[in-house]
Amino acid sequence: MTFDVNSPILFVLVGIIIAAVLAQSVFFLVKAWKRGKEIGMEPKKLRRIATTAAVFTIAPAVAIVISVIALAKDLGVALPWLRLSVIGSLSYETIAASNAANGMGLKLGEISALTASQYVTITLVMTISILVGIWLVPVVCKKLQSGMINLEKRDKKWADIFSASMFIGMIAAFVGYVFCDVSTIFEGSTAGLIPVAVMAVSALVMLISGALVKIFKARWISDYALPVSLIAGMASAIPITSWLA
């Protein structure tokens, strides 16, 4: 039997897992609501908080849907839906899936069909790798946090520098992936500039969003800056690819 990345059984399995996650969300929502009443919060205020939280989940949800669509071409809908609904992000999932595919002689974005073995391999790489963060946090986070607090007490300036350096280091790992094929321009190919140009468009949209927030004092724009920059970057990829490929 031919393997299908959009097989109904995959949707059933993924649906069960996501249903469990949604059940947890509902459970903690009910607990939070009850606790709010216990400490004297008015029902009107609780409803307003719940409504505001629901509205502001639309922005990240748009980014997630876009990410699922981007990965669905090669991996089907079920796997990206699962990975981006539980623990995951487009940047991580794309790199993990791409590395796994490259290891099997495939190229993400140009996969016509996956065998069951290839699909399982990509799934394992995408899933097991990100689980590191789950067990690493309780193991090292408390010690790291204590160290940061002690450093901040001794020298706040160096604590800020250290914190900013860690964040920049994390970003640099993803930025490096964007620039890794730029050297192809020395071989007469400009294809390596495509991800750089797409990133530049997304960054420009993000800067414009930041400027609008500052000029018009409209903080709600910042909540939609990420999905808008993602959409702009993906949309720009089409003309940029036809121009540079």
Image (cartoon, grey):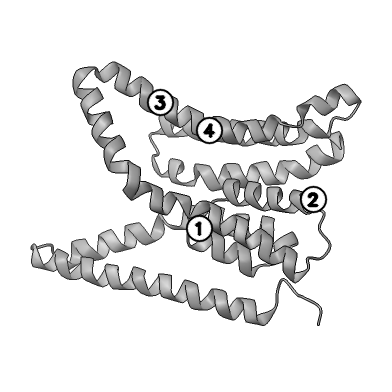
Q: Is residue 80 visible?
A: yes
Circle nearer the viewer, 1 or 4: 4
**Is 22 on the left-hand or right-hand side of 13?**
left
Of 78 and 196, the residue lying toward us = 78
Numbered disc 1: secondary structure: helix
Of 236 and 127, the residue lying toward us = 127
**Is 35 on the left-hand or right-hand side of 77?**
left
Numbered disc 4: secondary structure: helix
Q: Work out how far the residue at label 4 is from the one at label 2, CA to CA, in angstroms.
A: 24 Å
Q: Work out how far the residue at label 3 is from the one at label 2, CA to CA, in angstroms.
A: 34 Å
Going by the numbered disc 3, the residue's amino acid type is: Ala
**Is 93 on the left-hand or right-hand side of 144?**
right
Q: Position of residue 168 (x, y in %)?
A: 48, 28
N-terminal of the pair, mark 1 or mark 3, is: 1
Q: Which residue is mark 4?
A: 171
Q: Which residue is mark 1?
A: 61
Q: Which residue is mark 3?
A: 164
Label 2 near label 4: C-beta < 8 Å? no
